Amino acid sequence: MNTIGVLALQGAVREHIRSIQDCGVYAIEIKHVEQLEEIDGIILPGGESTTMRRLIDSYGFLTALQEFGKQGKPVFGTCAGLILMANEIDGENAHLGLMDMKVARNAFGRQVASFEVDLEINYVAEDFNAVFIRAPYIVEVGTDVEELATYDGRIVAAQQGHYLCTAFHPELTDDNRIIEYFVEMVNKSKQSLAS
Amino acid sequence: MANRGTERVKRGMAEMQKGGVIMDVVNAEQAKVAEAAGAVAVMALERVPSDIRAAGGVARMADPTITEEVMNAVSIPVMAKARIGHIVEARVLEAMGVDYIDESEVLTPADDVYHLNKSDYTVPFVCGCRNLGEAARRIGEGASMLRTKGEPGTGNIVEAVRHMRQVQSEIRKVTGMSRDEVMTYAKEIGAPFELLLQIREEGRLPVVNFAAGGIATPSDAALMMELGADGVFVGSGIFKSDNPEKFAKSIVEATTHYTDYKLIAELSKDLGTAMKGLEMSTLAASDRMQDRSE
């Protein structure tokens, strides 16, 4: 059976674990780099990206996660996870640089401007309840990146091969359709990596 | 259509803070130290609790200049405290755009009968609790996050431990109750019945519960995580220590890796002196902040 990890340095880890398990897949919390060998795909959860980056640096996760992605193993980032995956951040240095896109942090405003809205997401759903919390958005994407969803003219979900990201938090709802989509990405990658 | 200030959006904000440390700061410089150390949020204050305790008198919402200075200095969320029941202080903080309001017993209560009706606001609130009844009443009023009260500004962990153990123990108790027992228990502890039924069903509170009030060392933070806290607030503990940068970083790492005892040993080395603590028996009843609200 496939195993999906959730980077468990800080943030909404429990919710992602629950939604992976709801999809019938084994889920583990990743706190040490050695654990990356045990998993077929990883979710970078929502939380505070500055906090996660500091802890990523403290425990050697930066190159380990980049290597994990280079092996062709799927990575899914939500909110702070999306920021970690971008190769360009407005006004700041990039983190993992896995996806060819420029993002802006807290781009919809402070917490009082946080919102939820029904979104259409390509390949996933026509009416996905998307929860945006001090959310980032994607300012522009490279030619290899496909936009999966937009809100108010901003790109809020995207995919580049085995990399997936959303500016919103699917883990805060009971709707597992986007996690199911990621689980399918992990299945396909495992098959192709095995052959 | 986009909806702001919904229960999901307000509670969700606190979910994103889990496993993190929220630090009290009194100026932009401290806020930057906290952010660089890996704090998930800062609490902007005019004085940290131990100084409020020392100064005496009436403690109120901070001067908005300080709060704005902190908001402009960091990109992580900024929280601020309003007096219990002070509708206008809360509305002012909301209008300024702070990310979370702490309706806090650390400040002198403005209303000794009623707490704020927090469901009315777009901004989310965090409130203190010492037991399940108090936790459930605050959630009933619309709090989106809780923190156990502890005894602020003492650097003494004993009250934080007492309150976390109390809440966890009462959750376990209610989880094992039959439906008819829950109604009587709701009456006894003064908790909304429907909310207790929900807690019984899920085996946990419907909102995030951090620990606060007395955390002074990396081991203290790890202890509170071990006891079931979703994260920790550190008030006076950081900037009243000898080496705030080092204390802040060590407390952040101990909170993430709270069962990695070798790491906590490393983190605790050469930290310098922690804040000077207070023994509970030396506090007069009138100086106990935790008893200012129920």
Image (spheres, rainbow, N blue to C red):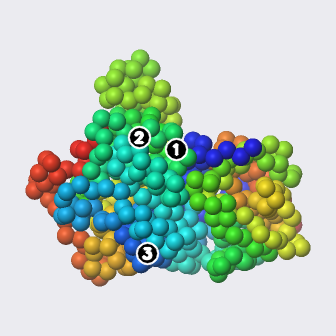
Per the image, the residue denoted by label 1 is: B121
Q: Secondary structure at mark 1?
A: loop
Mark 2 on the same chain as mark 1: yes
- The Cα–Cα distance between marks 2 and 1, rounded to whole angstroms, is 10 Å
Residue matched to label 2 = B116
- Residue designated by label 3: B28
Front-lying residue, B152 or A34: B152
Q: Residue at x 34, y 28 (%)?
A: B190
Callout 3: chain: B
Place residue A24 in its image quadrant.
Answer: top right
Image check: B146 left or right of A74?
A: left
Instruction: Evaluate whether residue A17 shows in this view.
Output: no
Q: Amino acid at mark 3?
A: Ala
Q: Between residues A189 and B215, which one lies in front from this camera angle? A: B215
Q: Are marks 2 and 1 in contact (CB under 8 Å)?
A: yes
Q: CA distance from mark 3 to mark 2?
A: 29 Å
Task: Specify whether disc 3 shares its chain with disc 1.
Answer: yes
Q: Is residue B131 left or right of residue A115?
A: left
Where disc 2 sits, the SS reads loop
